[in-house]
Each structure stands twice: as C-alpha cells, then as structure tokens.
Image (cartoon, helix red, strand yellow):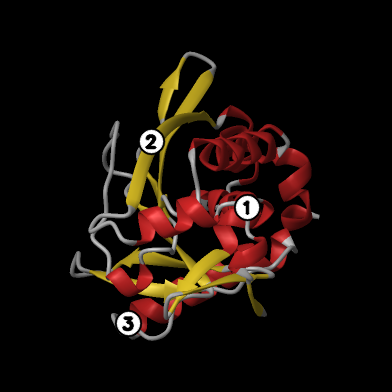
Amino acid sequence: MVAKRIDLDGYSRRATFEAFSSHEVPVLSVTCEVDISPLLAFHEMHGLRFFPLIAYLIDKAINQVDEMRHRIIDGELYEYDVVSPSFTVLLADKTISFCDAVHCSDARAFYWQVIERSEEIQRKSDLEMREKHGQYFVSNIPWLRFSSFTHPYFSKYASIPIVTIGKYERLGAKATLPVALQAHHGLVDGYHLGRFYESLAETVRNAHDELRPIVA
C-alpha cells in the first residue's frame, strides 16, 4: 500500500473537507438493502463460506471508489493506492477479535486468506489498535437485520470507512442483505456512497464470474 499526499490547493472538495473536519461528529452512516441472490446461489451451489465471499466483493467495491481510499492523517489528506480490510471475528467465548487481511484482486487467494487469518485469530485474539489508516473496517453481524447502524470510533481514525453486514432474508427467489456504510463526510457525500453501493451491487450481480476462480 502506498499513500500519496493530496495537495488541497488543487482539491475540488477542499471547502467541504475543511468544513466537516472541524465537526465533533464528522461521520455519516447509511444502510441499504442489497440483493444478494446471485451470491447466495453461488455460495450454496459450491458449499463455500459466506463471509469470505461477500468480503471479497466488498473489498473490490471499496477500492473502486477513490474517495473510500482517502484518509486524514495528522491533519493532512492522503490517498492510498489500495486499502485492506480489518474485520471482526467471533471467538469461542462469544467475545470478538480484530482480524487484519490484505487487499488481493485474486478471489481464490483472498477467500483462503480470510479463512486462514480467522482461524489464526481463534487461537490468539487481537484487540491492539495499531496504525490502521491503510485499512477499512468490516463488521459481520449475521444474527440480526437492521435498518441503521453507527459505530464508535477514535477521532484519529474517523476517516476510515466501516462496512457492516447483517442477517440476510429470503423473499421467494430473492435474498437481501442489510449493508451499512459509515464514512467521513469531509471525504464523501451521498454521491460517493451511491457509487459504493452501485459497485457492490454490480459485483454481486456478477458473483458467478467474480468468484469463479475460487472453485476453478
């Protein structure tokens, strides 16, 4: 991952960036229902784990939106070439641990990486808040459906997007999944949130092609 500082003098969103950076609560959060029918069909057809599959599609969608790779570090604005996921894992005692993965465009490598790192965390949990700017966060809450979701955050890491997925629901042949996205309003507006959801919807529609390398 490489971070490049953005010169605010040539930054079209400078006024918005400066306005929201001074807010006590600079983040916004939205939840949308995503049609995951093609993804669920692939998941059931091949007997694969659901979370690593949706995590790969989320990773691709996040990285396709430039603004989701923008970070505020010590008051300066940077853009990463790619960002990687840090997700939560439920442990045997029903507590959680953080689990860091690495962005990878290879679906098969990403899928097995998530599984292997999750299993490692089961043996040794990790709640250390080391440097996280090159990441984004993913919370998996498959026990409930929700219509909104807001996370706590350190002001230092307010510019890191947080994606939360809930319990999917079948409606006949269709299945939907609540997906929440929390992001810094100084970096993104509704337009950029929309781009993320459009990108995610597209990757899900093409799930069989996107994920085929896992079973090839």
In terms of sequence position, does the residue under pointer 3 or pointer 2 come before the other?
A: 2
**Quadrant of res 142:** top left
Of residues 66 and 152, which is closer to you in this image? 66
* Residue identified by numbered label 1: 12
Looking at the rendered structure, the secondary structure element under dot 1 is loop
Please tell me which of labels 1 and 3 falls first in the chain: 1
Give the residue displayed 59% in from the left and 55% down from the top.
67
Q: What amino acid is labelled 2 in the image?
A: Thr
User: In percent of the image, x 41 and y 50: which residue is there?
Assistant: 185
Q: Secondary structure at mark 3?
A: loop
In the image, 80 versus 123, the foreground residue is 80
The kind of secondary structure element at disc 2 is strand
Q: Quadrant of residue 168?
A: top left
Q: 10 Å neighbourhood of mark 1: few (<14), some, or many (≥20)?
A: few
Q: Position of residue 43 (x, y in %)?
A: 59, 42
Front tag of 1 and 3: 1
Return the residue at label 2.
Answer: 31
Query: Does the rendering let one see residue 136?
Result: yes
Q: Could you tell which of marks 1 and 2 lies nearer the N-terminus?
A: 1
Q: Amino acid at mark 1?
A: Ser
Tag in front: 1 or 2? 1
| Residue located beneath label 3 in the image | 129
- Residue 81 in percent (x, y) is at 69, 70
Question: Foreground: 41 or 202?
Answer: 202
Does 192 appear above or below 65? above
